[in-house]
């Protein structure tokens, strides 16, 4: 009950701040106050607007918001989100482009389960849609999953990926972003031994902690400093009475958000101060740069306690992937069994979350893979976000990834890709 009260207390504080913001905005906007212009009232209303939106967006799953994509015919084709494989803890979804021939490049984006929704990769999806059939893992918020659905840890996550890859078939090209890179590598190795015909053609790992000790960061140092008992005591709570997952042990999204914000507290504080000023001066917009970023950044989801704790213990502390000692349901997963799937790693030169060296370690683990099927790229000056969603991704990394996909596709796919480029 103590943990449940803590979770409800955080939700109470969030709701209270949302209410305070809405109240301040309403009071500061009273028409009668316009008779006596007062900058203080304008600032109070602006503070209220920014505060209300800030705390309200924390519990709302963002929409994908991809209405259409432009085809070679110059027309806009509507995009619908379709569930391909449903699951209690996550779905495989497909971005179906209406009125367009199916693309030869079939891409599975493996989204992180690290506090944010899969919509964090919205811009990544939009950049790939013109040239690819795009699928993505859409993980569910643990607070909305009944306890009766059972547990979900790193092994369950890996088996979900195995099922998704099997469903998509052997002509799939997998791109794993950040946190899921080690488990995606493990899932591929699992298929290599259990169901070789279901293996993807290529695997691109972007900014993932394959070997966290290869180049330590604040994230990896934190995992080393605290014990598992301390983590469980500090981070784990039970879902409160407000949600369907009441009673489930989770690492709450609100607690994760507190950690995210504290890493760059001064930067975030200035961003919100500047936004309040912009609203007060009447130059802010509903979809301006600030709101576009924070609508996504502040939307957080709870993780199951067992997934969070097993990630810290097995991926970071014990480095089971880095040591090639990972097991699924008691069965050892040998990454050396990957012999036909081309593997490429992408790292950011200025990545302070998964620093250069952590991801490229995957290539050394693929002892059964010929060198010609291995590739790597370090993007100079790029931070963590930039290597999958920023300018570095759009201008430099995305073209390299598509080239890698084409180089490891059947000849018919390469011809079709060249035809698309010519068009």
Image (cartoon, rainbow, N blue to C red):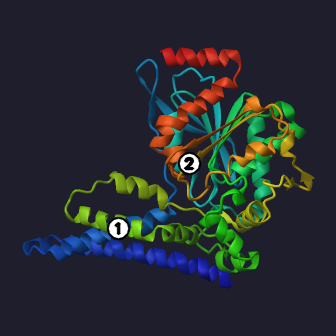
Tell me the quarter of the picture where residue 306 sits.
Answer: bottom right
- Residue at x 87% of width, y 46% of height: 334
Residue 45: x and y, percent?
Answer: 25, 71
Regarding residue 161, the answer to whether it shows in the image is no
Disc with the residue nearer the chain's start (1 vs 2): 1
Is residue 95 depicted above or below 406 in this figure? below
Mark 1 packing: few (<14 Cα in 10 Å), some, or many (20+)?
few
**In-image side of 35 versus 406 (left or right):** left
Residue 55's label in the rendered image is none
Mark 2 packing: few (<14 Cα in 10 Å), some, or many (20+)?
many
For the residue pair 46 and 77, the one nearer the viewer reads as 46
- Residue at x 46% of width, y 23% of height: 71
**Of helix, strand and loop, which one carries label 1?**
helix
- Residue at x 73% of width, y 63% of height: 316
Regarding residue 78, the answer to whether it shows in the image is yes
For the residue pair 118 and 331, the one nearer the viewer reads as 331
Quarter of the figure with the N terminus: bottom right
Tell me the quarter of the picture where residue 140 sits.
Answer: bottom right
Residue 243: x and y, percent?
Answer: 60, 68
Mark 2 — residue?
Answer: 348
Is residue 15 depicted above or below 320 in this figure? below
Circles 1 and 2: CB atoms closer than 8 Å: no
**In-image side of 12 versus 133 (left or right):** left
For the residue pair 293 and 98, the one nearer the viewer reads as 293
Mark 1 — residue?
Answer: 270
Could you tell me how far apart the alpha carbons at marks 1 and 2 are, in whole angstroms?
Answer: 26 Å
For the residue pair 296 and 226, the one nearer the viewer reads as 226
**In-image side of 50 versus 382 (left or right):** left
């Amino acid at each position: 009950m103590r943990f449940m009260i803590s979770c409800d207390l955080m939700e109470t504080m969030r709701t209270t701040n949302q209410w305070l913001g809405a109240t301040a905005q309403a009071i500061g906007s009273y028409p009668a106050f316009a008779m006596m212009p007062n900058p203080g009232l304008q600032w109070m209303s602006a503070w209220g607007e920014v505060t209300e939106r800030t705390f309200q967006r924390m519990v709302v799953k963002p929409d994908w918001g991809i209405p259409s994509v432009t085809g070679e015919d110059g027309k806009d084709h509507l995009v619908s989100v379709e569930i391909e494989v449903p699951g209690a803890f996550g779905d495989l979804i497909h971005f179906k482009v209406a009125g367009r021939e199916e693309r030869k490049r079939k891409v599975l984006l493996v989204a992180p389960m690290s506090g944010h929704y899969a919509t964090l990769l919205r811009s990544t999806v939009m950049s790939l849609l013109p040239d690819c059939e795009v699928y993505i893992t859409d993980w569910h918020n643990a607070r909305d999953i009944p306890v009766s659905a059972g547990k979900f840890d790193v092994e369950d996550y890996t088996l979900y990926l195995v099922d998704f890859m099997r469903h998509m078939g052997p002509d799939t090209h997998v791109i794993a972003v950040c946190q899921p890179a080690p488990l995606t590598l493990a899932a591929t190795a699992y298929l290599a031994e259990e169901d070789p015909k279901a293996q993807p053609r290529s695997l691109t790992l972007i900014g993932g902690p394959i070997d966290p000790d290869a180049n330590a960061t604040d994230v990896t140092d934190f995992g080393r400093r605290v014990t598992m008992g301390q983590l469980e005591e500090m981070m784990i709570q039970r879902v409160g009475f407000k949600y369907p997952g009441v009673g489930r042990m989770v690492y709450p999204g609100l607690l994760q958000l507190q950690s995210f914000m504290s890493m760059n507290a001064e930067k975030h504080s200035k961003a919100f101060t500047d936004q309040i000023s912009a609203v007060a001066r009447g130059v802010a917009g509903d979809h301006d740069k600030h709101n576009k970023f924070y609508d996504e950044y502040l939307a957080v989801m709870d993780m199951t306690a067992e997934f969070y704790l097993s990630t810290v213990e097995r991926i970071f502390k014990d480095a089971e992937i880095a040591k090639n000692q990972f097991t699924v349901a008691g069965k050892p997963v040998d990454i050396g069994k990957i012999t036909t799937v081309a593997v490429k790693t992408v790292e950011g030169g200025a990545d302070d979350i998964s620093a250069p060296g952590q991801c490229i370690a995957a290539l050394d683990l693929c002892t059964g893979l010929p060198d010609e099927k291995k590739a790597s790229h370090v993007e100079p000056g790029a931070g963590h976000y930039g290597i999958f969603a920023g300018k570095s991704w759009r201008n430099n990394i995305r073209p390299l990834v598509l080239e890698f996909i084409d180089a490891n596709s059947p000849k018919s796919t390469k011809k079709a890709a060249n035809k698309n480029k010519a068009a």
